[in-house]
Image (cartoon, rainbow, N blue to C red):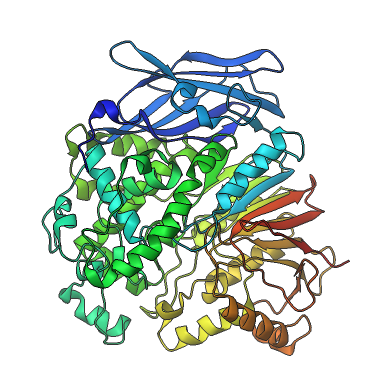
């Protein structure tokens, strides 16, 4: 690859993405090749109104350097007057260089516009009438990309053919740092080199510095040889892994698991935007011979993924976008059990790998969800980022791991409550191998306070609160034999304390009469309607699961699970009385009125339509293949 000079690098490496936006605050996220100053204009072409038009000051521009030619920017604006609900907000962003030159957004990204547009735009509403949602976007899964469907929905809305989506909620696994295709890892290496993303010293690893990773013979498809396996924790392993020698990281697809912070940042740049893909050359020259066939198969899929990124970038610049992590954003089985946590956080190298991925999540996902809430994190961590690299990396990792405020709410109608089911876990005191509860008692108490007094709530939980019972029972059996990691035993009912408190929240008469729960994680889609048995005025709970954006469950296996689940755990099955949900009536919505199916398997994006009180809840899966699956409620 020929050397790329700073002059030839694109000024915008990723983004812009519209993040938190309401009547009093508008946020944009983007990564640039220099530390530009910015001027932003927010206005309405229809109303001839201007809400903001100024150069940003230090309070409005938060900027962190992650490489010689890479700067993460969060632009947080307060309009000079409240933006009226329902307004379409047009915007322009101007990049101002140190030599006084100015470049407007559309000069850099002319393909950001849809037909008939003069400027990119998005709509601000307090009332949520319809929203798009999904999870699990694995670039090298052999399916089309559900985020391209988001682009199609926005294009149809701008043409007046459908209603404009109010927001896009991505509920986990937006990136797979633990499961990376070989061609993507090649692109990551070249992106690191082109942008001079900062390298780091690695203590406790077989390599001394992250810049040695790609020179190591185990770099491609053999990274389990590089991942930590600390003999000092042999006792933990003998209990936790039943005596079987195994790397700390448990992903079945960890052959190209990301390790360094530079790799994580390069992954985000390549996931959200097409720019750096245009500057890389994908070749199997450095790939060991046994893996060249797999590399070639993955390359075909990755090239198709890259072809859709221009539309994905356009979509994310035209709708308010919110996100929350699940395990693959960090690593498979992240914080699954107390034993996993002791093994990982007791090993400096393993802790660094997890911390690097969480740093990437903060900078590229979490930051824009609620910049005000995360300001203390920025204040405490920004000093570690310098023009010469990250200083005191271990201390920075500890700060990011200690942060406990990734959850957030939107004061919409209905209120949107997004749960952190990863870092506030209810750990088992009796066994290293038992799954931790997805939220601990304190976090659940805080959740209940957020719910009290609301008439309706949309709750986002990465894992379904009400999942497929048969699969949960299988996970429970494996857990009984100390094999929770074998089946990824993460569900709300796996921990008695968490399950009991969460179900009591639904029973509490002070909590909302109408719940919509949006989830992902499982790589198939379904909709359940839940009510409480033996109680008048039961809350109406609708569990909607849309997964994945670019991932799917093995089709034949899912059909068997679906069939057995319907037989064993039908509405009136006596087996229901042996579950945590014995006092709840669960009705399955059939996809496209199919009599013999309750689960839908197809990559795409979920569409939720609701009335103001959440009395009428409609759910569809807009499949990337073009199929529309409607989950119809029984009368």
* Horizontal side, residue 477 vs residue 182: left or right: right
Question: How many numbered circles are shown?
Answer: 0
Q: Compared to 273, does 580 lie above or below?
A: below
Q: Residue at x 47, y 38 (%)?
A: 368
Q: Is residue 423 visible?
A: no
Name the residue at 31% across, 82% down.
241
Which residue occupies the foreground of this view, 497 or 328? 328
Asked whether residue 473 appears in the rendered view, the answer is: yes
Picture quarter with the N terminus: top left
| Residue drawn at 76 percent across, 41 percent down | 162
Displayed quadrant of residue 232: bottom left
* Extreme-top residue of the structure: 100
For residue 48, which quarter of the picture?
top right
Nearest the camera: 592 or 568?
592
Picture layout, residue 44 above or below residue 130: above
Q: Is 319 displayed left or right of 240 in the figure? A: right
The percent position of residue 457, horizontal first and vertical second, equals 69, 51
| Among the 4 quarters of the image, the one containing residue 277 | top left
Whole-percent x and y of residue 280? 31, 44
Q: With 228 as the anchor, is 454 left or right in this view?
A: right
Image quarter where the C terminus lies is bottom right
Q: Name, please, the residue furthest toward the left.
A: 208
Residue 153 picture location, percent across and down: 67, 43
The front one of 112 and 173 is 112
Percent position (x, y) of residue 26?
A: 54, 28
Answer above or below: position of 485 versus 119: below
């Amino acid at each position: 690859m020929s050397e790329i000079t700073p002059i030839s690098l694109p000024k915008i490496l990723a983004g812009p993405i519209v993040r938190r936006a309401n009547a009093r605050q508008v946020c944009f996220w983007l990564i640039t090749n220099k530390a530009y100053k910015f001027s932003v204009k927010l206005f309405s072409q229809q109303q001839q109104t201007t809400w903001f038009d100024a150069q940003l000051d230090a309070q409005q521009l938060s900027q962190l350097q992650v490489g010689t030619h890479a700067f993460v920017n969060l632009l947080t604006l307060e309009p000079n007057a409240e933006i009226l609900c329902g307004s379409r907000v047009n915007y322009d962003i101007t990049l101002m260089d140190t030599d006084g030159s100015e470049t407007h957004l559309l000069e850099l990204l002319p393909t950001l516009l849809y037909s008939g547009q003069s400027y990119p735009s998005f709509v601000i509403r307090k009332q949520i009438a319809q929203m798009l949602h999904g999870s699990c976007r694995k670039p090298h899964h052999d399916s089309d990309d559900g985020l391209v469907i988001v682009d199609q929905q926005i294009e149809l809305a701008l043409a007046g053919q459908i209603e404009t989506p109010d927001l896009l909620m991505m509920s986990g696994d937006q990136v797979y740092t633990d499961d990376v295709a070989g061609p993507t890892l090649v692109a990551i290496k070249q992106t690191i080199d082109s942008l001079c993303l900062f390298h780091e010293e690695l203590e406790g690893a077989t390599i001394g510095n992250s810049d040695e990773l790609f020179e190591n013979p185990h770099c491609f498809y053999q990274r389990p040889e590089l991942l930590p396996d600390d003999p000092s924790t042999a006792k933990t392993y003998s209990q936790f892994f039943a005596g079987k020698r195994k790397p700390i990281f448990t992903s079945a697809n960890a052959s190209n698991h990301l390790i360094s912070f530079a790799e994580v940042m390069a992954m985000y740049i390549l996931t959200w935007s097409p720019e750096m893909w245009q500057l890389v050359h994908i070749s199997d020259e450095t790939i060991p011979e046994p893996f060249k066939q797999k590399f070639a198969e993955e390359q075909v899929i990755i090239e198709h993924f890259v072809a859709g990124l221009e539309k994905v970038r356009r979509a994310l610049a035209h709708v308010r976008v919110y996100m929350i992590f699940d395990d693959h954003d960090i690593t498979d089985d992240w914080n699954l059990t107390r034993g996993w946590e002791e093994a990982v956080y007791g090993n400096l190298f393993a802790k660094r790998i997890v911390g690097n991925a969480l740093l990437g999540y903060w900078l590229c996902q979490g930051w824009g969800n609620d910049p005000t809430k995360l300001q203390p994190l920025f204040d405490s961590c920004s000093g570690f980022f310098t023009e010469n690299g990250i200083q005191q990396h271990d201390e920075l990792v500890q700060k990011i791991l200690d942060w406990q405020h990734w959850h957030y709410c939107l004061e919409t109608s209905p209120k949107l409550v997004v749960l952190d089911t990863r870092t506030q876990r209810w750990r088992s005191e009796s066994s290293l191998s038992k799954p931790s509860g997805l939220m601990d008692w304190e976090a659940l108490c805080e959740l209940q306070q957020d719910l009290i007094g609301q008439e309706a709530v949309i709750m986002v939980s990465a894992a379904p609160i009400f999942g497929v019972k048969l699969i949960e029972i299988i996970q429970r059996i494996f857990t009984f034999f100390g094999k929770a990691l074998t089946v990824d035993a993460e569900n709300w009912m796996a921990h008695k304390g968490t399950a009991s408190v969460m179900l009591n929240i639904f029973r509490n008469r002070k909590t909302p009469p109408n719940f919509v729960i949006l989830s992902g994680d499982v790589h198939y889609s379904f909709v359940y309607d839940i009510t409480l048995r033996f109680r008048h005025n039961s809350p109406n709970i609708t569990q909607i699961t849309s997964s994945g954006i670019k991932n799917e469950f093995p089709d034949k296996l899912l059909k068997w699970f679906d069939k057995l689940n319907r037989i064993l755990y039908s509405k009136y099955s006596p087996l229901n009385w042996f579950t945590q949900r014995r006092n709840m009536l669960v009705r399955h919505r059939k996809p496209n009125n199919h009599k013999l199916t309750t689960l839908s398997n197809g990559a795409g994006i979920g569409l939720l339509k609701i009335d103001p009180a959440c009395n009428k809840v409609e759910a569809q899966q807009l499949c990337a293949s073009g199929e529309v699956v409607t989950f119809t409620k029984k009368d």
